[in-house]
Amino acid sequence: MSLTVTGIIERKGLGPGVWALISDSGETYELQKTPSELRKVGLKVTITGETRSDVMTFAMIGPVLEVHSFEVI
Amino acid sequence: MKKFLLLCLFIIGLGWAIATFPGLGASGTYDSIVLDFREDVGSTKIAQDINAIAQQYHLSAHLNSKFSTTDNVYIVKGDRDLLDSLKKSDIVKDTETIEPNYIYKVSEVPNDPLYNKQWNFRSINVENAWNETKGNGITVAVIDTGISQVPDLKETKFVPGYDFVNDRLEATDDNGHGTHVAGTIAQSTNNNFGVTGIANEANLMPLKVLSESGSGTVSDIAESIKFAADNGADIINMSLGGGGENHLMKEAIDYAHNKGVVIIAAAGNSGQNSSEYPARYPHVIGVSAFGPDGEKAPYSNYGAGVDIGAPGGSEAGKIIQNTIDPETGESVFEGYQGTSMAAPHVAGVAALIKASGVKNPDEILTVLQQSARVVQEDPLNHFGAGQLDAYAAVQLALKGQITFSDFFRWLRDNGYLNPRFWIDGGAIALLPKIAMVLGSYLLAWFLRNYFPFRWNWNLSWGLIAGSSGLFFLRGLYIFDLPQWPLRVMGSSIPELGGAIQGSSMLNPIFASVLIPFILIALFLGHKEWKWSAIGTCFGVASCLGVSAFLSPVVWGLGYGLPSQLFLIINALLCFGLAHLALKSEAKPI
């Protein structure tokens, strides 16, 4: 499912750590295929991507959002 | 009336079964007997008694140590027959006690230097479990990011696995997560290096389904489950989750379960009500996480799908194992946290249970649940049946099977019934509830002798609403539904004040004579509803009375005497109110 979300980038300390997006409405997404430009805690971004319901992860913090494109705000 | 008598008979039967259960005292081992002679008997008489034992049983009794002279403590080799025989002999009158000289075992403390940082293993009581078994002969499949053979896994046994991400035989780890999880299950132990693992004599089967980034497809995971079942795995650990329900996955889980594999999964880390898939599927044991303080970790999911709680760590204390640094690939001892870390604790203990002789996966789950430390106040189902206890689990498993007596002992020790038999997870206090309902009926019965009235349904509903509510509903947890409506329906009137937040404290507005008074004032003139109001008075009186003795906690009054007085006074007022209402309304029948 294609999706555009705006929020803040966070690093979650589960296992060796994962990248997450906390949306403005408070939902937590686990980011996959995160480009290096997005790997900055506190960055405000709009990400367009796909939520993957056929994927499981060890982080289990919320829906998996595979990044297709992004815009730093 | 008939139902009431049947209930009384049931309670008497239950009480008898619990009271006559022999208990744990009979289970210790000993091969000698202690004779403690009375000090006023004198050394000549003691010498005669020792002589008598030597002649009659051909055994020599000797002082326990040189410090035993003043207390006259003697030891003689012997078993239960000798103990019984000595207790019946004339020697008894010269002694203070004759009792078994129980053998105490020192629990096994491993020599791994970082073991002192593993608070989580002491929390699950694993040292005592190691005296019995270390999981030899059991294979645990770790479906994860793979396992790298770091130095502290050097002495751990491996069986062949598979890398489903790169389609190759060698399933090494490129992330660190899988190696960490494997360490909790079977880190090399007593090797004078690093940390320890729970089932450290078990075999590990590495199955890589998650890529370097920590994600993997449902199809790979489903295939790896089938691979594990077909290649001799006894236990599967899945510290992963997400996505939706999937037919392929469900089929694979059923396949493995039918082959006798125990399947364990993490509940998830979004801090929400309900577990993630695959912990949600039937036949999967869902594990929530707690921190060093024993409280649910903030990230851990809870509610439906949680069968048991295990240490997962928190910021206050993490789970330390040997793994790889994902940047360099080098060996590190790293603290992780997550329900990912809690699940392998249960997988390790499941391996110990299976090594102790319980083979069936459903029975292994029952052992895990019945041996778990019950958390008394768990209205949101943070921990399912309770918190993992490795030693209690192994002890229960060593009995070979779960008998009727075990069931009663469990019930007696905890005062709890496990509603897993009919609903998913959690526990509700049954005995206090029965006392509350029974108490309200007794109160009504008592007053009936003075003011005869016809027993009716309105009265009964009033009794139930006031005393206990439909209390069994409180133990129901349904996926994705909020639990508070069930808690409200499952609460009595005095408990309603705390039902929405899930608090077990009594709210003084609800837990008082106020609501019965309002009901009586409103409905005393109504022909039928007045009986509900009167029943409510009895019910609330009973609920407050029982609470005053079992859990006197009222908001603002704390735990103890002030709350107790408040509850007793209000219980008496409720009873008085019912008394007045009956006096003015009851007509002879």
Image (tube, grey):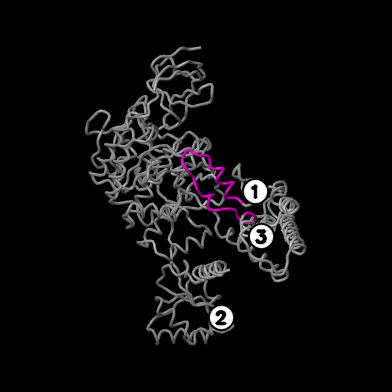
In the rendered view, tell whether residue B73 sits above or below residue B124: below
The quadrant holding residue B463 is: bottom right
List the residue tagged with mark 1: B505
Observer able to see residue B504: yes
Q: Nearer the viewer, residue B216 or B441?
A: B441
Residue A53 colored in magenta in the image = no
Q: Could you classify mark 2 by the number of other residues whose Cα lies within 10 Å: few (under 14), some (14-19), or many (20 or more)?
A: some
Q: Which secondary structure lies at badge 1? A: loop
CA separation, marks 3 and 1? 17 Å
Q: Which mark is on residue B542?
A: 3
Cβ atoms under marks 3 and 1 closer than 8 Å: no
CA separation, marks 1 and 2? 53 Å
Q: Looking at the picture, which amino acid does disc 2 mark?
A: Arg
User: Range of the magenta residues?
Assistant: B465-491
Q: Nearer the viewer, residue B117 or B126?
A: B126
The quadrant the C terminus of chain B occupies is bottom right
List the residue tagged with mark 2: B38
Q: Which secondary structure lies at badge 2? A: loop
Disc nearer the start of the sequence (2/3): 2
Residue B481 colored in magenta in the image = yes
Q: Looking at the picture, which amino acid does disc 1 mark?
A: Met
Q: Which mark is on residue B355?
A: none
Q: Are marks 2 and 3 on the same chain?
A: yes
Q: Position of residue B47 (x, y in %)?
A: 48, 85
**Closer to the observer: label 3 or label 1?**
3
